[in-house]
Amino acid sequence: MPRGRFISLEGGEGVGKSTQARRLAAALQRRGLDVVLTREPGGSEGAEAIRGLLLSGAADRWTIRSEALLFAAARADHVARTIRPALEAGQWVICDRFLDSSRAYQGVGGVLADADILALHDVGSEGLLPDRTLLLRLPLGESSARASLRDEGEADRIGGRETMFHRAVAEAFERFADAEPARFHRIDADGTPEDVEARLCAALADWLV
Ligand SMILES: Nc1ncnc2c1ncn2[C@@H]1O[C@H](COP(=O)(O)OP(=O)(O)OP(=O)(O)O)[C@@H](O)[C@H]1O
Ligand SMILES: Cc1cn([C@H]2C[C@H](O)[C@@H](COP(=O)(O)O)O2)c(=O)[nH]c1=O
């Protein structure tokens, strides 16, 4: 059985990752592929429980270090119980956020270096990386407008951080894409959901022949 493909969707709040993860999963299923759609934080029973701890409560509920460890612990469970078994069974895994979100969100404060977050990932998840990362990009004003319309002003503990934080996160994703052009594909997330889905499928075209 050949190993499946591992695709992550990344980007800031409200760019359309969850919408497109669902659409991409359906598009690949229509092509006859066996697809697992999952998300982070979450994607396994334990990781979903950690998601609740991470995304609710006061802004200062966790320090940057404890937050990074919790994300890495959630990811370790998700990788061991959901992602690796699916890939080994030949399934395609579409993951709504993965390691690069930790590098961007927990890495921008200046407390943890990128190497620290990668080290946690090595310990927790044996360094598993996506085969391809689709980075959805939208001007910050448009993505935050989409997110606040969706959340009706009730953002979660991390989504509700100030604009400067989210700008730094978006810039971090750009740096990661510059550094790893073979893994990252930049996707324009403007336009209708149909337009964006077509761009995602085009970014996988070499696998879909
Ligand atoms: N192409 C689009 N055009 C207009 N609205 C969109 C588009 N794609 C998604 N939306 C809407 O924008 C909002 C945010 O989309 P979605 O939840 O998919 O983003 P996300 O990147 O997963 O956000 P977050 O990381 O904050 O969870 C939703 O209300 C969704 O219906
Ligand atoms: C995986 C991951 C996520 N985050 C942040 C990013 C978002 O603010 C939330 C997840 O919410 P979503 O609606 O499911 O996108 O968590 C993070 O800070 N670090 C991570 O590793």
Image (spheres, helix red, strand yellow):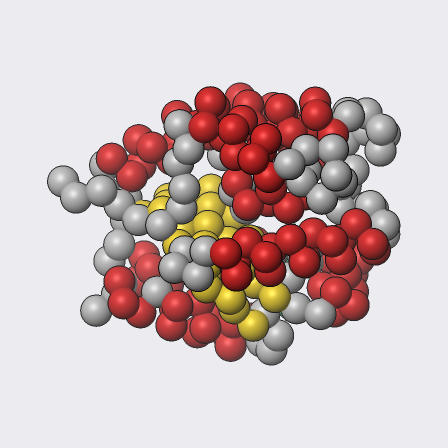
Q: Quadrant of the C terminus?
A: bottom left
- Residue 146 appears in the rendering: no
- Residue 107 at x, y = what percent? 67, 40
- Residue 207 at x, y = what percent? 26, 62
Q: Is residue 114 left or right of residue 76?
A: right
The image quadrant that residue 149 belongs to is bottom right
Please state the total of marks drawn on the protein image.
0
Residue 64 against residue 193 in the figure, above or below: above
Q: Which residue is located at x 59 percent, y 31 percent?
A: 116
Q: Which residue is located at x 46 percent, y 50 percent?
A: 8
The image quadrant that residue 84 belongs to is top left
Of 55 and 32, nearer the camera is 55
Residue 194 against residue 146 in the figure, above or below: below
Q: Quadrant of the N terminus?
A: top left
- Residue 20 at x, y = what percent? 51, 60
- The residue most toward the left is 1
Q: Is residue 62 left or right of residue 95?
A: right
Q: Which residue is located at x 82 percent, y 46 percent?
A: 161
Of 194 and 98, nearer the camera is 98
- Residue 6 appears in the rendering: yes
- Residue 98 at x, y = what percent? 52, 42
Q: Which residue is located at x 46 percent, y 22 percent?
A: 123
